[in-house]
């Protein structure tokens, strides 16, 4: 999958949930790009998991090496990640997690402000203390604002 193909597919999946009151579509696309290396990560290619979602419930899972930040240091570990049938199923589960899990109440409360949403999301989504800054940088640099998540938008073409 090329970067443009990834953006197109992720935008379509993200918009489906943004329209139903979910997280900002541009943030969802940026987060999927960051977490999956534009759809090139082993986790995204083998498990359609674009957000690093850990195994939970009765979902199938895949075990892969990963790095987690612990006490300020990156530690290599092996983790079980959720395995999905499609990109859309992964995006739907992310939306369900954000809508239901109490830890994301702050993010839900600021869904209308993408940058505040990113900062609130980052507090619980990842162990990387620089996660919010990485996600914000990608969101800004690639023009993933709510109005420009369309991969064919003129604003995004200039980025």
Image (cartoon, rainbow, N blue to C red):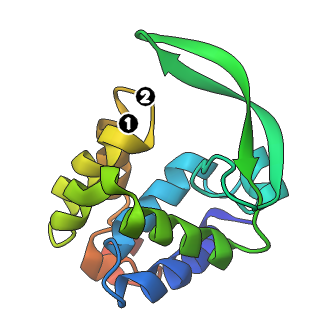
Q: Quadrant of residue 128?
A: top left
The answer to whether residue 47 is above or below residue 63 is: below
Q: Which image quarter holds the C terminus?
A: bottom left
Left or right placement of residue 37 versus residue 24 in this view: right
Residue sitting at x 20%, y 55%: 106
As helix, strand or loop, the secondary structure at mark 2 comes to loop
Horizontal side of 109 relative to 83 (left or right) equals: left
> How far across and down, in percent of the image, does residue 5 sit?
65, 74
- State whether residue 134 appears in this view: yes
**Residue 118 % position (x, y):** 28, 52
In the image, 1 versus 60, the foreground residue is 60
What residue is at 47 percent from the left and 77 percent from the top?
Answer: 14
**Residue 48: horizontal and vertical position, in percent?**
74, 63
Residue drawn at x 47%, y 88% as measured from the top left: 16
Query: Which is more toward the observer, 131 or 40?
Result: 131
For the residues labelled 1 and 2, say whether their Cβ atoms are less than 8 Å apart.
yes
Residue drawn 68% across and 16% down? 76
Query: As rendered, which of 149 and 126 lies closer to the eye?
Result: 126
In this orientation, which residue lies closer to the viewer: 77 or 50? 77
Apparent side of residue 43 relative to residue 88 in the rendered image (left or right): right
- Mark 1 Cα shell of 10 Å, populated few (<14), some (14-19), many (≥20): some
Q: Is residue 89 above or below residue 54?
A: below
Residue 20: horizontal and vertical position, in percent?
Answer: 36, 89
Gap between marks 1 and 2 measured at Cα? 5 Å
User: Badge 1 is on which residue?
Assistant: 131
Quarter of the image with the N terminus in it: bottom right
The residue that label 2 is drawn on is 128
**Mark 1 residue element:** helix
């Amino acid at each position: 999958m090329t970067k443009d193909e990834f953006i197109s597919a992720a935008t379509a999946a993200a918009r489906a949930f943004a329209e139903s009151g979910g997280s900002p579509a541009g943030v969802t696309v940026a987060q999927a790009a960051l977490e999956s290396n534009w759809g090139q990560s082993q986790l995204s290619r083998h498990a359609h998991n674009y957000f690093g979602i850990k195994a939970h419930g009765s979902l199938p899972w895949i075990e892969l090496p990963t790095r987690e930040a612990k006490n300020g240091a990156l530690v290599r570990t092996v983790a079980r990640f959720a395995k999905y049938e499609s990109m859309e199923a992964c995006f739907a589960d992310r939306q369900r997690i954000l809508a239901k899990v109490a830890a994301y109440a702050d993010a839900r409360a600021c869904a209308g402000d993408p940058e505040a949403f990113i900062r609130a999301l980052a507090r619980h989504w990842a162990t990387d203390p620089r996660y919010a800054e990485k996600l914000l940088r990608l969101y800004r640099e690639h023009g993933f604002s709510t109005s420009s998540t369309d991969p064919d938008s003129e604003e995004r073409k200039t980025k």
